[in-house]
Amino acid sequence: MLSIVQSIPGLVWAYTFDQEQRSCRRLPPDATRADLSFVGNGFRWLHLNLADQRVAAFLEEFPELPSAVVSALTTHETHASITLEDGMIYGTLVDFQREFDEETRDIGWLHFAVCDNLLITTRLQPLRSIDRVRAAVEKNPARYRQPIDIFELIVAEFQRTLISLVIELTEELNQIEDVVYGATTQDERRRLAPVRRTVVRLHRHLRTVLTLLRRAAAADDDEMPHGFDDVAGRLTSRLEAVDHDVYALQDRARLLHEEIDSKLSSETNRHLYILSLMTAFLLPPSLVTGFFGMNTSALPFSDGEHGTALAFGLMALSVFGAWWLLKRAGIL
């Protein structure tokens, strides 16, 4: 029995689905707990904001939710997890945060629990994929006959978000690549670094979700919710296709970074080569001026009228001698 307290803490939205009518009804923002008690031949979907500290106490009042599920729904841990137990599936999925006026590439976390007639999702920050799930549910509610169908849609929307990010990152890499392989040499590592960081995080979290789905699909049949086996197969195929694209993007970014390092290293070597040649040409004249700058007696050309000119001639001759030696050695 739910508490007699009427408010639903942290409510972002709530839907009740009627399987017979194949429709859904969104509860008003001021919905009470009593509105959740009538389901008929359908199920409920609650989406809650964990910023409200009362959410944990509210979820504990659901008799169908074990303590482990409540803990998974209210945790602030930042790693993906999927657990199957007694016909329920719960855990944490990765998503991307959304600001009020724009979508970001910051990682966010969606906690979920799927029961026979109940789906609960919780989050701390607004997320990109879950909003599109809500819009799809409202557009065609007849497609979703059980909570596992919405779970599949959540992961599918995450996959579509990954595809859009891959397209964005590919365009950024194209622009960087045009500069790197252009005629001029520019240091594009500052632009490339955030792209590589995003791709690495995408690949890491995507591989984790794939591994979790494969492990869940290999669980005993009595541990799975009805229909999860087929859902896991479809979602694994979807995510594997995106994983291939993300891996290719990661490899491409790594090669670009190596090319930038190679070009910058070549440019640095060229500058050092020029400085070495300048040093080689200036060292002999420096020896000449050092010799004639000694305050000793009987220096050559000290008594003649053209001593300075002869000293300059020796300096020029030393430069020519240095050039001849470098040319003979094959350095020039």
Image: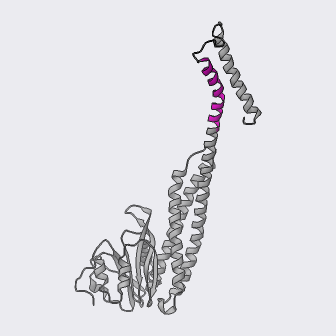
Main SS of the magenta part reads helix
Q: Quadrant of the C terminus?
A: top right
Question: Residue at the front extreme?
Answer: 297
Q: Position of residue 329 (x, y in %)?
A: 75, 35
Residue at 68 percent across and 17 percent down: it is 313
Residue 257 appears at what percent x and percent y? 58, 54
Q: Residue 232: x percent and y percent?
A: 53, 82
**Residue 274 highlighted magenta (yes or no):** yes
Q: Nearer the viewer, residue 192 or 139?
A: 192
Magenta extent: 273-292
Q: Quadrant of residue 281?
A: top right
At 60% from the left edge and 69% from the top edge, which residue is drawn? 244
Q: Nearer the viewer, residue 251 or 128?
A: 251
> Is 271 part of what is drawn in magenta?
no
> Total marks drawn?
0
Q: Is residue 330 above or below residue 319?
A: below
Q: Nearer the viewer, residue 45 or 298?
A: 298
Q: Quarter of the image holding residue 28? A: bottom left
**Residue 190 to residue 327: above or below:** below
Residue 145 visible to the viewer: no
- Residue 277 visible in the picture: yes
